[in-house]
Image (cartoon, grey):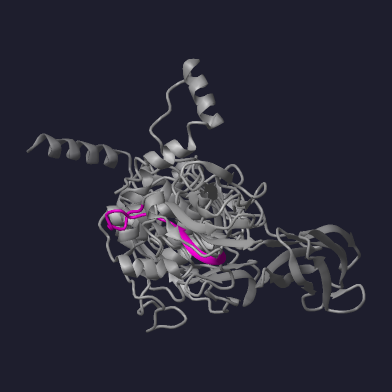
């Protein structure tokens, strides 16, 4: 029976020749403070993700008297080779791309992994808040891959600033009851 | 008259001399927030109003400044209701607000706040009640935090509360005051990635993830193991199709996903096997990506160097036919143990293991007496985590060497279990074959699963002399390759063992071929 909490095999297989031990011993010899009982490492973690990422950025906004032209950059990055990678973007209602279409697709070469960037202009006929949605799909190592991304596009309007009062970010309730003082 | 009664009488007399009239009034009502339900297509469009549970509620003077604005603090109950008795002495404009913190809730240490300093909790407020006399009760009715107007903050608070209560169901109590959980989120701030920072026990929630419950629950798993167990993961970026992750990272990420999804199973929420991330945009759909723990789709990997294999193996320990997944009433494995079993192993065994990985969970499972050996072998086999002896055992010495063909492939495991108790030991496999003088033999390991970092030694007929050896056939490739031309007829021996480094288990294919 092997008690992993003591892990003699694992410990002595991996550590005696390790430079880490040399540094540790040197540090102790130099009077470095003793280490606390092992609690494991304390590295920040990141959330799980597929081996491809997609972002939608706004590069510039040419504001007209009403509405404007938003220059966007779709950036797709793959950690592994992606077969049949297709990026698509959909303009929200009343918006359209420079060629007049509302939906665009691009075949993207990602079989050798890496990053591809796609610039695209969107015509915004009216001021307002819009959401530009994009997605990438393909196959990686025989598995279907999908990522989606969205960009909140503000043209001629601003998000209302959060109201901070009494140490909290306050929002008015959507449906207040009938006060009965 | 007792001294206490005398003091009270003197106080009341003094107050009366000031001309103040004190009264009690009760502020009551219900706080809710709008949730967004989801499945593997993203948001479903179903947006129910759920109670703001166990959150601070403040009764405030709308026109007062500083500390004088706070009249009384209470909290909501499990149904989002509150009833707070306020002692007051004047007519004023009052309102109530619920906050995403828990300082008024006994035994709960949870807050959700913004990401930019000064970091502040979120609040949803009632309308003002002007000219409120100090003795008039007010029922503020049902107050709801809407999407984009506080809803995200309260959804995150509720998600954190579910994590804490799942933790309590296994650990006996909620985390204490020394280990509070903080979630930080802000619209359009911080980027889309979520993370857990153990230095301050804070989950940084990606700006798209105000309603991505499973993303946040995964990170809460890191929090839970941080305060109760420990991790040796190097952290950093990782993706789901990397089948050769660091053994320690794969375990830490896989068990965090297990914890996050088990929260949903514990609370009987629908489709607990689905991890879903959306792009956060309004309306139905808006899927970023999803994966399924039960079917291991769309991602699949073999062995414990994959977070996918780890979460799938751990999930199968606990899920049952009754789990409200895609196929209720059916399960693809026969194991259905309580989540507390997994928790006990991490808390009381893995915590002090060296280079913590799924291998340690396995040994801890049996060291902690959890049993069900054949069932857990079957469950882990589903992602080819093969912690059992192969049919060639015990071929640990030249005397017990296993004869193999000079032209064939066999599947092997590095796993010994001398006393057959489930807890494994390091394994060394010895094989023998009859060599023919002048024949060139190619001996290699292939299809390494679960950090089976192979190393080969070809031994002469005396079983001692090393004729050839190889650890890694190439830089970055843990498989091994020996090409050797026999100088005489007779037996040769092949020793296969796990190289030094992370892990001691794993499985591999051994291929031997000869050409004259």
* Above or below: residue A148 compared with residue B2: below
- Counting every numbered tag in the picture gives 0
Residue B333, x across and y down, in percent: 38, 75
Q: Residue at x 63, y 76 (%)?
A: B285
Residue farthest to the left, as pictured: B1
Which residue is painted at 54% across and 25% down in the image?
A23
x, y percentage for residue B367?
28, 52
Residue A76 pos. (x, y %) = 76, 62
Q: Position of residue B27 (x, y in %)?
A: 36, 61
Does B417 appear in magenta?
A: yes
Quarter of the N terminus of chain B within the rendering: top left
Residue drawn at 70 percent across, 58 percent down: A79
Is B108 magenta? The answer is: no
Closer-to-camera residue (B45/B128) = B45
**Above or below for B162 versus B200:** below
Residue B431 relative to residue A160: left or right: left
- Quarter of the picture containing the C terminus of chain B is bottom right
Residue B413: tell me if it is visible: yes
Q: In the image, which residues are magenta?
A: B407-424
């Amino acid at each position: 029976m092997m008690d992993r909490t003591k892990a003699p095999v694992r410990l002595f297989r991996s550590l005696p020749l390790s430079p880490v031990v040399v540094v540790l011993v040197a540090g102790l010899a130099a009077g470095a403070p003793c280490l606390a009982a092992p609690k494991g490492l304390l590295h920040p973690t990141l959330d799980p993700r597929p081996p491809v990422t997609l972002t939608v950025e706004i590069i510039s906004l040419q504001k007209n008297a009403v509405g404007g032209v938003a220059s966007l950059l779709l950036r797709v990055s793959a950690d592994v080779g992606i077969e049949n990678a297709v990026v698509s973007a959909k303009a929200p209602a009343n918006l359209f791309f420079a060629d007049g279409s509302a939906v665009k697709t691009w075949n993207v070469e990602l079989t050798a992994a890496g990053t591809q960037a796609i610039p695209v202009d969107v015509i915004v006929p009216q001021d307002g808040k819009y959401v530009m949605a994009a997605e990438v799909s393909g196959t990686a190592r025989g598995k279907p891959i999908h990522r989606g991304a969205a960009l909140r596009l503000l043209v001629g309007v601003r998000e209302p600033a959060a109201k901070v009062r009494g140490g909290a970010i306050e929002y008015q309730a959507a449906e207040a009851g009938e006060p009965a003082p | 008259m007792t001294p206490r009664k005398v003091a009270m009488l003197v106080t009341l007399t003094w107050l009366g001399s000031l001309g103040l009239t004190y009264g009690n009034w009760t502020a009551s009502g219900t706080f809710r927030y709008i949730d967004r339900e989801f499945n593997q297509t993203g948001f479903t469009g179903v947006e129910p109003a759920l109670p703001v549970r166990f959150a601070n509620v403040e009764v405030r003077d709308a026109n007062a400044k500083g500390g004088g604005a706070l009249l009384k603090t209470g909290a909501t109950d499990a149904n989002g209701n509150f009833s707070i008795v306020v002692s007051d002495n004047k007519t004023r404009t009052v309102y109530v607000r619920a906050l995403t913190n828990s300082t008024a809730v006994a035994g709960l240490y949870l807050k959700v706040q913004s990401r930019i300093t000064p970091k502040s909790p979120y609040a949803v407020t009632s309308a003002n009640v002007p000219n409120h006399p100090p003795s008039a009760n007010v029922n503020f009715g049902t107050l709801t935090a809407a999407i984009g107007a506080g809803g995200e903050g309260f959804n995150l608070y509720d998600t954190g509360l579910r994590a804490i209560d799942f933790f309590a169901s296994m650990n006996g109590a909620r985390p204490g005051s020394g280990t509070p959980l903080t979630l930080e989120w802000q619209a359009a701030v911080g980027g889309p990635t979520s993370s857990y920072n153990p230095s301050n026990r804070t989950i940084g929630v990606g700006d798209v993830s105000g309603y991505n419950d499973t993303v946040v629950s995964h990170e809460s798993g890191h929090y839970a193991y941080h305060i109760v167990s420990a991790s040796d993961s190097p952290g950093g970026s990782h993706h789901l199709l990397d089948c050769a992750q660091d053994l320690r990272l794969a375990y830490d990420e896989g068990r965090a996903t297990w914890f996050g999804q088990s929260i949903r199973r514990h609370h009987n929420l629908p489709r607990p096997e689905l991890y879903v991330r959306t792009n956060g945009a309004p309306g139905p759909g808006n899927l970023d990506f999803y994966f399924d723990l039960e079917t291991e789709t769309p991602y699949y990997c073999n062995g414990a160097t994959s977070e996918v294999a780890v979460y799938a193996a751990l999930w199968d320990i606990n899920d049952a036919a009754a789990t409200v997944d895609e196929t209720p009433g059916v399960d693809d494995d026969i194991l259905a143990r309580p989540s507390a079993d997994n928790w006990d192993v991490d808390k009381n065994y893995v915590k002090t293991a060296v280079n913590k990985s799924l291998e340690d969970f396995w040994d801890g499972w049996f060291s902690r007496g959890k049993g069900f050996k054949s069932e857990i072998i079957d469950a882990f086999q589903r992602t080819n985590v093969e912690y059992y002896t192969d049919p060639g055992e015990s071929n640990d010495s030249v005397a017990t060497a296993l004869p193999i063909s000079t032209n064939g492939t066999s599947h092997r495991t590095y796993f010994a279990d001398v006393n057959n108790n489930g807890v494994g030991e390091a394994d060394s496999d010895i094989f023998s074959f009859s060599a023919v003088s002048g024949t060139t033999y190619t001996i290699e390991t292939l299809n390494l699963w679960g950090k089976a970092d192979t190393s080969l030694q070809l031994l002469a007929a005396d079983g001692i002399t090393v004729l050839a050896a190889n650890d890694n056939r190439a830089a970055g490739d843990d498989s091994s390759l020996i090409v050797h031309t026999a100088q005489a007829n007779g037996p040769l021996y092949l020793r296969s063992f796990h190289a030094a480094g992370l892990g001691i288990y794993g499985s591999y294919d051994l291929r031997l071929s000869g050409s004259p």
